[in-house]
Amino acid sequence: MKNKPAARMLFLFLLALPVFLPAAAPAQTVSFAAGKTFTTGIGPKSIAVGDFNRDGIPDLAVPLGGESKVAIHLGSVGGNFGPAAKFPAGTQPIGIVAADFNGDGKLDLAVANHASHTGVISVLLGAGDGTFGSATSFSAGDFPRALAVGDFNRDGIPDLAVVNDTGEDVSILLGDGDGAFSGPTHFSVGPNGSLPISVAVGDLNGDGVLDLVVANNFGSSVAILLGAVDGSFTLKVQPNTNLTLPQPTAAAIGDFNRDGIPDLAIANSGNRVTIRLGVGDGTFTKPTLQNFTVGTNPVFVVAADLNGDGILDLAAADFGGGRVSVLTGVGDGTFAAVKNFSVKSGPRAIAVADLDGDGRPDLAVPNDTAGNVSVLLNATGFAPAGAFAAHSDFGLTDDTLLSPATGPVSVATGDFDGDGMLDLAVANNTSGNVSILIGDGAGAFTAGTPISAGSGSSSVAVGDFNRDGKLDFAVANNAANNVSVFLGDGLGGFSAASGSPIAAGSGPSSIAVGDLNGDGSQFRQRQCDDSFRRRQRHLHGGHARPGRKRPFVPRRRRFRPRRRARPRRGEQRR
């Protein structure tokens, strides 16, 4: 069997696992552009997102219950998707997940076939070009309806949890790493008549093992199954009736009050999403404010930070209203008033991913009745993670006429004035000087008079060259064929070091600083005003002049044993 590192597991069917978040910024209202619609086929009831053709752009996989196929929509720039390419996927596929089941680095699909009492899940192995092989069937249970992926026995290989609605249980199929699954092993989710219809995965009790959350629609309850390291599960008894809810349809896991413990958001009848706060042992409590109206018939809910404030929000698929209802999180387990976004008729599920590459989470929604997929692109005005605000420009000199600074080509950072805030040193190639810009700690900088360095200043580097605890800098001067060194006074001022500039060969264009001989000093010297002859040895590969062939080897101190003192007159030798 192949080597199967845990790192290769990629769960693209978005499961809202516990999130530990920093202090929040003021919440922004979530906004989405008008939905784009892509025709997919008959009876789309769920959706998975993944890069199926490995072009770096998310694609969509949609099971078509009315066609017994899976539709693949390959993504393109701007959150657009191509026409559906369809692959046979067993009888009446309605649930889907994507993961690398055989460890070849290409995403595969698993679908739940809601067809009979001897229901199966079908696995389609991906070719990496957006196509998939023939479906392989594995037994699951009575009318498998939904499934989730996770490493339930912690062997680094993706496994499957399958909800069987008529069977009233969850089947666990353990992956072998080659795309096949053993089992199933069945675990009860409640009494007869429960009709489980959805499953979510997360570590609810903090033991490092994945647990399951199952919505029992007819049983009007939510079942918590705590996992063990062997892939088995135990139904957790809940205090009072904390997880008794009217006809729950789906649950999302997330830390909604930011206490480090996973909570639940549960879509249920009564046009609402209900919040239950986690205790940390797999049980849940009722908050004072617990129910939030989301439409006419919410059938799915997902948790994600949709407005970039560091707090989890909720998006619910309103099947009856043909819309997505968004609840903006406050950070204490409560949510602001709902905001609705129109899609097409019969939305069944929601996948969250950055579909247009702008760093913001977007939504993909399969519309069961309409037979298409709606894509809602996030238009919320926030800077996504990894993005930057509009740039600010700062001058390089305090007097452009008397002390010009032009042609900046290199920059280095350091705290030059000892105030604990970063400053900048900028090498100006055209004017042959270095600008020192003192930072205020808030992203603004003020320049003084540039320091003349040499013709064609091309690169600057910072270091403490004389080991006085104050930052200095060195500049490579491309046109002057030398390096200038300036010693800092710790107050933002600099003066040329003795022996500077140093000849550096023809056209030096870059400079770096480091302890090259392991003596603890970036430039070896005896005192601050010492000659740069020793420094030249380091700059010229260990010899004092560029043309000298013999490498410089530091002298080692010869070991000499201490001589015994002669005995004084009258004393005896020992």
Image (cartoon, rainbow, N blue to C red):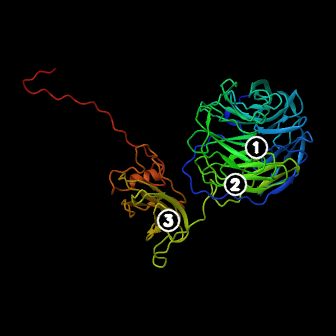
Foreground mark, 2 or 3?
2
Query: Who's the residue at 38% across and 55% down the image?
Result: 470
Find disc 3 in the rendering and name its residue.
Answer: 444
Foreground mark, 1 or 3?
1
Residue type at mark 2 is Val
| Residue 476 drawn at (x, y percent) | 50, 60
| Residue 120 drawn at (x, y percent) | 85, 30
Q: Name the N-terminal-most of marks 2 and 3.
A: 2
Asked if one can make out residue 55 in the rendered structure from this viewpoint, the answer is: no
Report the front residue among 354 and 462: 354
Residue type at mark 1 is Ser
Disc number placed over residue 370 in the picture, else none: none
Q: Is disc 1 in contact with disc 3, using a CB cutoff of under 8 Å? A: no
* Residue positioned most to the bottom: 401
Q: Real-space Cα distance between discs 2 and 1? A: 16 Å
Q: Name the N-terminal-most of marks 1 and 3.
A: 1
Query: Where, by quadrant of the figure, is residue 484 drawn?
Result: bottom left
* Mark 1 residue element: loop
Q: Quadrant of the N terminus?
A: top right
Report the front residue among 389 and 300: 300
Find disc 2 in the rendering and name its residue.
Answer: 338
